[in-house]
Amino acid sequence: MSNCFIIAVDGPGGAGKGELTKRLATHYGFSLLDSGAIYRVLAYAARKAGLALFDEDSLEQQALVLNLRFATADDGVHVILNNEDITSAIRTEQVGADASKVAALPKVRAALLQRQRDFCNLAKGLVADGRDMGTVVFPQAQVKIFLDASCEVRAQRRVLQLQQAGKDADYETVLQEIKERDERDRNRPVAPLVASKDAIKIDSSNINIEEMVAVAIKYIDSILAKLKD
Ligand code: DC
C-alpha cells in the first residue's frame, strides 16, 4: 500500500471541481489526477479510429493501449496522445458527451482503473477529480468531497465560459445537455455519480471560488491535524 494522502473530489460537470482540485493541488503541493480527461481522450481516440461509442470490446482494447501522457508546462497541464497535444481538442461539448457515453461501459471503466490508481505510486499526495474517485478508484481516500451545484447555475457558468472563449452559446441548449449528461452519469449501473457515504458535501451554487476553496481547506486541515495526533 502506498502512503499517498488522497483528496477525492467528485461531482457533476460544472460544479467547480476543476478549479477546486487545481487550487488544492497547488496549496498542498500534491499531484493532480483529472480522471475526466482520461475518458475524454479515449472518446477522442475512439472517434478518430472510427469506433462506435457502444462497441464495448473495441473500446476496451483502445483503453488498454491508450498512449496518453500528461505534461506539466508553464501554462498548465497538457494532454498528449501519441505525441499530439490534444489539450483543447478534448474540451468541446461533443467530446464531453462522447466521454460520458464511453464511461458508461463497464469494460472501459475496468480497463482504465489501474491507470488512475498509478497516479498514487510516486506521489506524497494526490488530488483526484472525477465521478467515482471516493467510491471506486480510491475508496481508501483520507478526504472525500462531493461538490455539487444546481443544473441552472452550472449551465450559466458554461455559457459564460463558452462566450469568453468567443463561441456561440444558447442557455437552454447547454442546460439540456447538462441534464442529459447528468442523467447518464448518475444512472449508469457501474460507478455511477453518487456521493460516497463518508464524503462532505459542498454546494457551490451560491458561493464563489474563494469561499469554496476555503471551506475545503478548512476541512482537509482538520483531517490532517487528526492524523498527526
Ligand atoms: O469531468 P469531465 O466533464 O471532464 O468528464 C467527462 C465525462 O467522463 C463525464 O461526463 C463522465 C465521465 N467520467 C466518469 O465517468 N468518471 C470519472 N471519474 C470522470 C469522468
Image: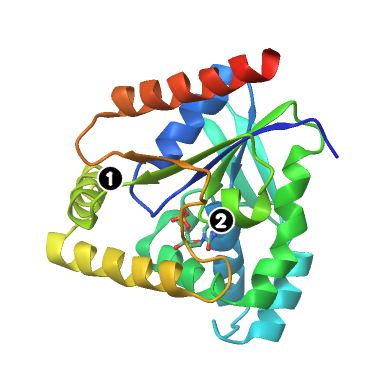
Residue at x-position 25% and y-position 29%: 208
* Residue 52, above or below 144: below
Q: Dot 2 corresponds to which residue?
A: 132
Residue at horizontal 63 percent and vertical 34 percent from the top:
142
How is colour applied across the structure in the image?
rainbow
User: Would you say 25 lies left or right of 187 here?
Assistant: right
Residue 227, placed above or below residue 203: above
Q: In x, y percent, where is residue 79?
A: 60, 47
State the residue in front, 198 or 136: 198
Q: Is mark 1 within 8 Å of ligand 1?
A: no
Q: Could you say where residue 217 lies in the image, as x and y percent from the top left? A: 46, 21
Kind of residue sitting beneath label 1: Ala
Label at residue 165:
1
Name the residue: 43% across, 27% down: 216
Which quadrant would the C terminus be assigned to in this image? top right
Q: Residue 18: x and y, percent?
A: 44, 40
Question: Mark 2 is on which residue type?
Answer: Asp
User: Quarter of the image holding residue 103?
Assistant: bottom right
Which secondary structure, mark 2?
A: loop
Q: Nearer the viewer, residue 214 or 75?
A: 214
Q: Position of residue 14 (x, y in %)?
A: 33, 49
Distance from disc 2 to disc 1, alpha carbons, whole Å, reads 29 Å
